[in-house]
């Protein structure tokens, strides 16, 4: 039977053409996503008005499409984290801030679900203890920084001291700062100095090998209300609800202003803020995953290369193992 080489050649050429088209499509899709998510970055020097940032943005994507992309990012994140861990010279700190019910916990769980636990450290900061108040406001956060080779996650962070404490300056009195006796004593100069301290702290981390990424999950007041009601109505979510959350909701506008001022004052080239649309949880998770993966790819962690003498020992030990009876 004669072989139709022409037909085979045509099929191979068609296959390679389709493969090339798919590759080009993937490159274009990745480029498009990178552009979409880069727009979520709060640039240094920009004036931030949160009411101009769409909380329901989805980048023109569909939910199922986003899930597929997120799974791909999770696989990439697993490989990059393994290389970061093996390299053992740098780390990355992910900071999550948001209004209540914005989806911080879910975003952390979904995005980081494929990461090796030994290379990841998660801290959820609650109200400061008496020991914390015996130190400066950055002390407990400094003690929770990721070790070299690790990904650190701070679910709420040192930014609480310029967010919650700015809405409720009476909380600052617990710090027993010299010269501050009343909530009204915390003036513009005080807040400027605190922002300066945060920038310098993060600059110090950057200089010493820790990359800092900051995510503000931007949820609308209407969506927050819907999620609170869901927590009340769903027996499985009752435990998440706190009457204090509804009380804090009454300070919504003050919180929005506090976030605007904090982001404006502390978003830098080295430690950027990303304002993540959070009304659609699936898009928020996709955006966070893409930003983390892109950042790690730019860091370009590498598996360490053994010196020649160590490679020689590997060969010796291989010979010993293969020579066993």
Image (spheres, helix red, strand yellow):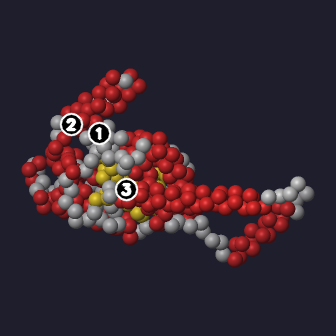
Residue at label 1?
Answer: 100
Which numbered tag is attached to residue 49?
A: none
Residue 158 position, x and y percent, is 30, 53
Q: Is 175 situated above or below 17?
A: above
Residue 9 position, x and y percent, is 72, 62
What is the spatial separation of the Cα atoms under label 2 and label 3, in whole angstroms? 28 Å
Residue at label 3?
Answer: 37
Q: Nearer the viewer, mark 2 or mark 3?
A: 3
Q: Is residue 197 visible?
A: no
Which residue lies at the image location 33% right of the left edge and 44% below the top edge?
278
Q: Are marks 2 and 1 in contact (CB under 8 Å)?
A: yes
Q: Nearer the viewer, mark 3 or mark 1?
A: 3
Q: Secondary structure at mark 1?
A: loop
Residue 142 position, x and y percent, is 36, 57
Residue at label 2?
Answer: 249
Q: Is residue 324 visible?
A: yes
Q: Secondary structure at mark 2?
A: helix
Q: Quadrant of residue 2?
A: bottom right
Residue located farthest toward the bottom when viewing the structure as drawn? 308
Which residue lies at the image location 42% right of the left edge and 64% below the top edge?
210
Image quarter hosting the C terminus: bottom right
What is the spatial separation of the Cα atoms under label 3 and label 1, in whole angstroms? 23 Å
Residue located farthest toward the right when viewing the structure as drawn? 325
Q: Are marks 3 and 1 in contact (CB under 8 Å)?
A: no
Whichever of callouts 2 and 3 sits on the residue coming sooner in the sequence is 3
Q: Residues within 10 Å of mark 2 (few under 14, many from 20)?
A: some
Q: Are marks 2 and 3 in contact (CB under 8 Å)?
A: no
Q: Secondary structure at mark 3?
A: helix
């Amino acid at each position: 039977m004669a072989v139709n080489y022409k037909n085979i050649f045509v099929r191979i050429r068609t296959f390679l053409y389709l493969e090339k088209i798919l590759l080009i499509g993937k490159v274009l899709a990745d480029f498009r996503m990178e552009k979409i998510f880069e727009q979520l970055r709060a640039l240094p020097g920009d004036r931030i008005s949160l009411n101009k940032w769409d909380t329901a943005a989805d980048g023109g994507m569909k939910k199922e499409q986003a899930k597929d992309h997120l799974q791909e990012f999770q696989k990439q994140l697993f490989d990059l984290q393994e290389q970061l861990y093996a390299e053992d010279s740098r780390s990355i700190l992910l900071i999550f801030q948001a209004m209540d019910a914005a989806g911080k916990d879910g975003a952390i769980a979904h995005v980081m679900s494929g990461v090796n636990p030994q290379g990841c450290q998660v801290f959820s900061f609650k109200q400061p203890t008496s020991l914390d108040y015996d130190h400066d406001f950055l002390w407990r956060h400094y003690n929770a920084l990721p070790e070299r080779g690790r990904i650190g996650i701070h679910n709420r962070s040192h930014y609480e001291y310029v967010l919650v404490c700015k809405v409720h300056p009476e909380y600052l009195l617990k710090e027993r700062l010299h010269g501050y006796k009343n909530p009204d004593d915390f003036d513009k100069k005080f807040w400027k100095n605190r922002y300066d301290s945060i920038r310098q702290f993060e600059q110090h981390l950057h200089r010493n090998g820790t990359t800092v990424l900051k995510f503000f999950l931007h949820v609308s007041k209407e969506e927050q209300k819907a999620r609170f009601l869901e927590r009340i109505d769903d027996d499985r979510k009752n435990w998440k609800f706190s009457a204090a959350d509804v009380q804090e909701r009454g300070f919504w506008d003050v919180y929005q202003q506090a976030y605007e001022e904090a982001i404006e004052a502390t978003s830098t080239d080295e430690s950027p803020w990303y304002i993540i649309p959070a009304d659609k949880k699936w898009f928020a998770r996709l955006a966070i995953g893409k930003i983390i993966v892109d950042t790690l790819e730019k860091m370009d962690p590498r598996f360490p290369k053994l010196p020649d003498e160590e490679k020689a020992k590997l060969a010796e030990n291989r010979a010993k193992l293969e020579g066993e009876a």
